[in-house]
Image (tube, rainbow, N blue to C red):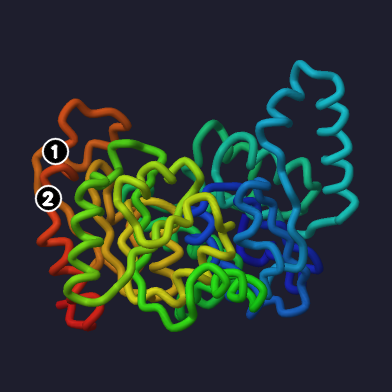
């Protein structure tokens, strides 16, 4: 499909990016470009409920559509859920979307572009699971060489947005979220946010290293340590001996508010790390099994620290030795943290 097929003034645009935290943060720069090109268009964002805080009440999102992936996955054998899926599809079609943009690139998300009834269905030419079969405008990208942000912005460019516009991360946070954080952390307290969790165990810089770093940050810089993450990270916080254990006590918007005030963030390759990068906070990102060029903090490669091992990156969720992060000791991480806080990175 050629560029002249893009509607000049679409009334309704659907963005499909259900998950996960980091991927949604990477997709946020698409919003200001779409709003600049079509200021009167109503933009809806389809997202899994677990991640909806990232776009709920967002200043550039007019509507959040919740997609219950795990529940709808049962629709193929559960008649009640199948009926819910039909209702969900009819509700989409009633909105009369002009454009549906699939930033997820999987069979399910691509099928939604078709089910939405949108005249223009946009996605990546090399998306997985047969997804390109559902699109009528294909956008080329490289999954190996393009950062996720760059891939998403290529779709915006294909829709006529100006590629020379600045890359803007607008995060959803308000005074209610900030007030909640002020109730947890005194306003005048200087602190570092530590994010020791990760879905993959192989991505986790050891808790004992975080503990040693927390001690050094307080002794040398007077920074209290605040552990942020899910409830599953509470035990890691206990091992670290953090001054404030907020694991499981903040939603995603409140984590944004927490990081806004942080003098430093040290985070594994996880969603909160990408939030810190988007906020422009001093940041250190220990990397091991994954490739920072593809999934690292966008525009912040100065914050990445990794050992040059022959097996890295391996993209493995299991490892018998985990040398890439176990051998990454506290001293070089502290040195990078100090450069970040002083703004003296090369």
Frontmost residue, 309 versus 207: 207
> Closer to the N terminus: mark 1 or mark 2?
2
Q: Give the SS element for disc 2.
A: loop
Q: Which quadrant does the C terminus fall into?
A: bottom left
Q: Can you identify the residue that label 1 sits on?
A: 323
Image location of residue 248, percent across then percent down: 53, 50
Label 1: element kind: helix
Tell me: 252 left or right of 337. Answer: right
Q: Is residue 313 above or below residue 33?
A: above
Q: Residue at x 71, y 68 (%)?
A: 57
Q: Position of residue 65 (x, y in %)?
A: 75, 52
Marks 1 and 2, how far apart in space?
A: 9 Å
Quadrant in which residue 264 is drawn: bottom left
Between 44 and 341, the one lying in front of the other is 341
Q: Residues within 10 Å of mark 2 (few under 14, many from 20)?
A: some
Disc 1 crowd, CA 10 A, few/some/many (<14, 14-19, 20+): some
Mark count: 2
Q: Nearer the viewer, residue 265 or 153?
A: 265
- What x and y, as percent, mark residue 135? 64, 45
Question: Residue drawn 15% across and 30% down?
Answer: 321
1 or 2: mark nearer the eye:
1
The answer to whether the residue labelled 1 contacts the one labelled 2, judged by CB atoms less than 8 Å apart, is: yes
- Left or right: residue 20 versus residue 233 is right
Q: Which residue is mark 2?
A: 307
Side of 319 relative to 68 (left or right): left
In the rendered image, the quadrant that contains the N terminus is bottom right
């Amino acid at each position: 499909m050629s560029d002249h097929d893009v509607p000049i003034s679409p009334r309704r645009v659907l963005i499909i990016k259900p998950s996960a935290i980091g991927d949604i943060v990477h997709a946020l720069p698409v919003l200001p470009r779409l709003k600049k090109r079509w200021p009167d268009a109503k933009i809806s964002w389809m997202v899994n409920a677990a991640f909806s805080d990232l776009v709920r009440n967002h200043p550039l999102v007019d509507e959040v559509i919740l997609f219950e992936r795990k529940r709808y996955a049962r629709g193929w054998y559960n008649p009640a859920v199948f009926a819910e899926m039909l209702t969900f599809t009819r509700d989409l079609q009633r909105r009369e979307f002009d454009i549906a943009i699939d930033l997820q690139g999987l069979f399910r998300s691509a099928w939604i572009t078709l089910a939405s009834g949108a005249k223009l269905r946009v996605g990546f030419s090399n998306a997985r699971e047969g997804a390109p079969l559902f699109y009528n405008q294909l956008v080329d990208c490289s999954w190996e060489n393009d950062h996720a942000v760059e891939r998403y912005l290529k779709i915006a460019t294909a829709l006529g947005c100006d590629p020379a516009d600045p890359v803007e991360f607008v995060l959803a946070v308000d005074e209610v979220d900030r007030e909640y954080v002020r109730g947890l952390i005194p306003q005048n307290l200087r602190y570092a946010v530590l994010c020791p969790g990760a879905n993959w165990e192989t991505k986790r810089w050891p808790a004992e290293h975080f503990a040693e770093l927390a001690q050094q940050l307080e002794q040398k810089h007077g920074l209290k340590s605040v552990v942020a993450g899910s409830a599953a990270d509470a035990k890691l916080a206990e091992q670290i001996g953090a001054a404030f254990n907020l694991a499981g006590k903040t939603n995603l918007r409140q984590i944004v508010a927490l990081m806004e005030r942080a003098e430093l963030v040290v985070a594994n390759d996880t969603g909160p790390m990408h939030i810190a990068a988007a906020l422009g906070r001093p940041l250190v990102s220990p990397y091991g099994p994954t490739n920072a060029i593809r999934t690292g903090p966008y525009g912040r490669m100065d914050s990445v620290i990794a050992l040059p091992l022959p097996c890295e990156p391996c993209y493995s969720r299991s490892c018998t030795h985990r040398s890439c992060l176990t051998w990454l000791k506290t001293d070089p991480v502290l040195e990078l943290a100090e450069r970040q806080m002083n703004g003296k990175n090369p």
